[in-house]
Amino acid sequence: MNHTESEAGSWSRRDFLRGTGALVVSFALPIPGNAQSGATAWPATVPPEMLDSWLAVLPDGSVVASVGKIEAGMGIGTSFAQIIAEELDVPLQRVTIRMGDTATTVDQRGTGSSNGIITGGPVMKKAGAEARHSLVAMAAQRLNVPPEQLTVNDGVVSVIGDPGRSVTYGELIGGKRFDIPVSGKVAPKPAGQYKIVGKPVPRMDIPAKMLGAYPYMVDHKLPGMLHGRVIRPPEAGAKLLGVEPGQRLPGLVKVVTRGDFVGVVCRREEQAVRAARDLKVKWSKPAPMFAASYDELYQSLRTATPKTSKVVMNTGDTQAALGTAAKVVDVQYEYPFQSHACMGPGCSVADVRPDGATVWMGGQKPYGLRKAIAELLNMKNEQVRVTWLPGPGSYGMNDADDAAIDAAILSQAVGKPVRMQYMRAEGTGWDPKAPPITTRMRGGLDAAGKMIAYDMEARGYSGRIRPSGTDAPGDSLSGQLIGGMKAGSTDLFQHSEENYRFPNKRKASHLVAWEKSLITGLRTAHLRDPDGMAMCFASECFIDEMAAAAGQDPVEFRLAYLTETRDREVIKAAAQRAGWDTRPSPRQAQKGPVVTGRGIAYAPRSDTMVALVAEVEVNMDTGNFRVTRFVAAHDCGFVINPRSLTGTVEANLIQAMSRAMHEEVRFTPTRVTSVDWATYPIVDMTEVPDAIDVVIVNNRPEAKSLGAGEPSTRPVAAVIANALFDATGVRIRRVPFTPASLQAAFRGKAVKT
């Protein structure tokens, strides 16, 4: 962690570990230079080929393992600790995980795309196996016996049959370097011998959080630290005309302006809040930049000339098949802008000196951010250290990197450490947004009810207008406001990921230009499972529509067109656990205003497979509804920690349920108006389902461990919409499913938003 034992209060690190298990956060072992802040030269890279870059044994025999990932709230730090403890044969509570520090951990390009365990796990396993092999070799020399006559238990190497002859890891190497490469030639422990990996171990970060001892980003302080706030343009595209000179505000140290960037630095935080509110700034009056409503937005997406298009699949002749079909379904699905709306707005601390900088941040990718900050400050990479500390969660490109860029700008301007903390309106109003998408779905059935054509045509803004990492200053909001800095925008084509086998199948994606949004609160970027939830909503609801048109059960209809074993297994597992009522949807007429229904949706994400069943209860008079139960069948291969996986899936379902039921960014032609929990509501405790059942499929030690951070998010909007249709007989094709939109749909009218 970024606190020494003397800074941690009356509890030492060892006291804390004794009471609660390993502390899984980012911290730094002693390295050359000033390890807390200020100017120094950090390593340009931490060499990935060396064992010491991944693992260290301390004098007391405890183990510190380093990984170029971060803990976004899903417990992967505990899983990494399980892997190391397993390979080294040490107690789990004696393993500490160091994460996301550009000076002390290997650049693994941060965390994203559900890749924490996929790319972090195998190297942890290799490093642990290499270290154990080396330690046993050292013990063999110390005890004067062949290595094969030794055994390891709880970090103690002893002679088989003579346990009195032993030596601990700490005695062998404690506090010293291995100075050997990770050869990759040492075989990890066979899966059949696992004692820790694969077990439902409680997450190691929870005790510290429960005791208020977890070192969050917002808690980080430096001696002499000042406080900063930014002042964003009042309307999208407004240009800074000037700041009234000579303003005297309490505690004000400096007003910082660069291009259209305006920030204040004050001695205390409450002074910075007031200064940002009271500073007299003059802005230009821009022309309207956004649509006036979602109806207008979706219509513009459907009619605009795309800047680029791509056909991602074209099997058979879909158009001809639609022309000969006995029944054709042709519908539009619509998905809105959505905000990260993290529980806490972005925060960062920067200490920029003339010859170096140290920045603490709460985002997912500190390595690219170091490059961007170095360029911004006109420094070399090795002059900049970026260290991750836990933030409020991110799951994509939220406002954490923007806060770090702003802190660096303000710290450089005053030559002292600056803490940058956004306010709620900035965090929700100015964070990057998931893009809106409108999708036309067409399908054809033959006279026997067999699906012969599937056509998907998506239109939207790319989710990479604000790139999926901060590799250059122009990738940030303030870099754009300063001007002259280019963002690394790329095209991210939008299509469904599914494995249905139809004789005629076409999927096309059209991207509409949106680069003008880079200086606004509607710039688009990655949100958890980028575009996956929107595209699965269109595809899986449409498959349900086709099943209904064919008069077939939704589960049986899907299975008829899926040939891959893992696809079929998750659908069958979810249906079986849910006690699926085999029949066509919707249900027969129900009496009274309250009706119930069930739905299913399935989705692969990369190599992970998920199927969901949802049960809903709907009040036809008010439009209010509850998801009363979720059943999730989840196949992500071998699971390092089933308890963490179950918690991750449950969290995914609740967050995605919020996105499906409530979340859409509101705006006028000149500004974002969703700026707090009233204007951007999220799910609350009263809406949590009565039951969430998670069925883990294909969890075999010999199977590869796959991603789990995002896949179960993907089918949530679709499965809820399908359950609503089953309950009410009304198809909802626009997210979110608010009471007003449901009431309008029940009346056969479209709700205007």
Image: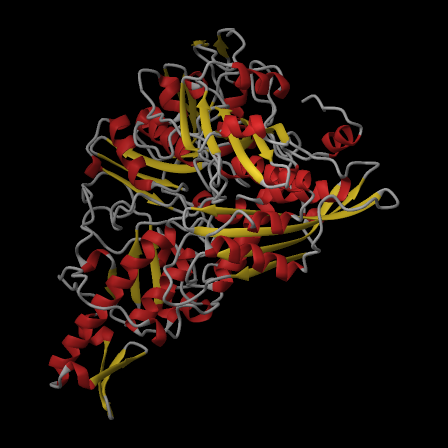
Image location of residue 23, percent across then percent down:
40, 61
- Residue in view at x 29 percent, y 47 percent: 108
Give 180 or 263, whichever is nearer the viewer. 180
> Which residue corresponds to the image point at 43% horizontal and 9% vertical from the top-left?
242
- Side (left or right) of 101 relative to 232: left
584 sits left or right of 284 in the view: right
What percent of the width, then of the height, locates residue 569? 52, 58
Identify the image quadrant of residue 92: bottom left
Q: Quadrant of residue 222?
A: top left
The foreground one among 521 and 619 is: 619
Question: Which quadrant, please, contains the C terminus?
Answer: top right
Q: How many marks?
A: 0
Quadrant position of the N terminus in the picture: bottom left
Which residue is at the front of the view, 321 or 183?
321
Give percent across and percent down for residue 562: 51, 49
Above or below, 469 relative to 609: above
Q: Tell which residue pokes out farthest to the right in this image.
A: 592
Answer with left or right where residue 621 lies relative to residue 565. Answer: right
Residue 241 position in % (x across, y down): 44, 7
Q: Is residue 658 visible?
A: yes
Q: In the rendered view, tell whether residue 173 sits above or below residue 379.
A: below
Task: Report the residue at 47% width, 47% height from top.
Answer: 604
